[in-house]
Amino acid sequence: MAGAAVAVVSDDNLSLALIHLNLARRGYAVVVALLDHVEQGWQPPWPPALLVLDLVTPDPYCWELAERVRRRHWARTPRLLLLTMCTPDAHRRISLAAHQHIHKPFTIAELVEAVKQAIAEPP
């Protein structure tokens, strides 16, 4: 649903910029932060409907990062979309309560569709 609040957290500045641009152009209210800032306690100015967690870090560390971010900082955000180079792992995705895991590389169309689907699903 366009207009929904989306928080994007990434360990890469370029990814943040590209995701922000493409979601904002489609009407989403997007706020972005580097993973380092989140680890230091950053919080968005409003509760997001969706957290998009974009990790460039490879296996197995990316799963550890995702679990840490989800548990420490974003446990109350009802929806999570993972964008990673991690090997798909259904068990970990379920433990994180992730609505979807998109394996990199992906297209903008795939990203936009995944965001739309995650926001449409009940929390």
Image (tube, grey):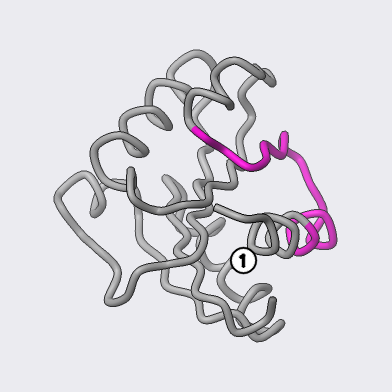
State whether residue 86 is above or below residue 30: above
Q: x and y percent of residue 68 in the render?
A: 31, 30
Left or right, residue 31 beside residue 6: left
Sort mark 1 into few (<14), some (14-19) or many (20+) by Cα contacts within 10 Å. Answer: few
State whether residue 1 is above or below residue 123: below
The secondary element bearing badge 1 is classed as helix
Which amino acid is tagged 1?
Answer: Leu
Give the residue furthest to the left. 40
Q: Nearer the viewer, residue 87 or 18?
A: 87
Can you tell which quarter of the image residue 11 is in? top left
Q: Residue at x 24, y 38 (%)?
A: 72
Left or right, residue 51 beside residue 33: right
Q: x and y percent of residue 75 in the render?
A: 33, 43
Q: Which residues are magenta?
A: 97-113
Q: x and y percent of residue 74 in the render?
A: 33, 47
Q: Residue at x 35, y 55 (%)?
A: 34
Q: Quadrant of the N terminus?
A: bottom right
Task: Provide the residue designation for mark 1.
Answer: 18
Left or right, residue 82 beside residue 1: left
Q: Residue at x 65, y 86 (%)?
A: 27
State whether residue 89 is above or below residue 5: above
State whether residue 95 is above or below residue 22: above
Residue 49 sits inside the magenta stretch? no
Looking at the rendered structure, the number of numbered marks drawn on it comes to: 1
Can you tell which quarter of the image residue 2 is in? bottom right
Q: x and y percent of residue 36 in the render?
A: 26, 47
Q: Nearer the viewer, residue 11 or 88?
A: 88
Q: Residue at x 59, y 47 (%)?
A: 81
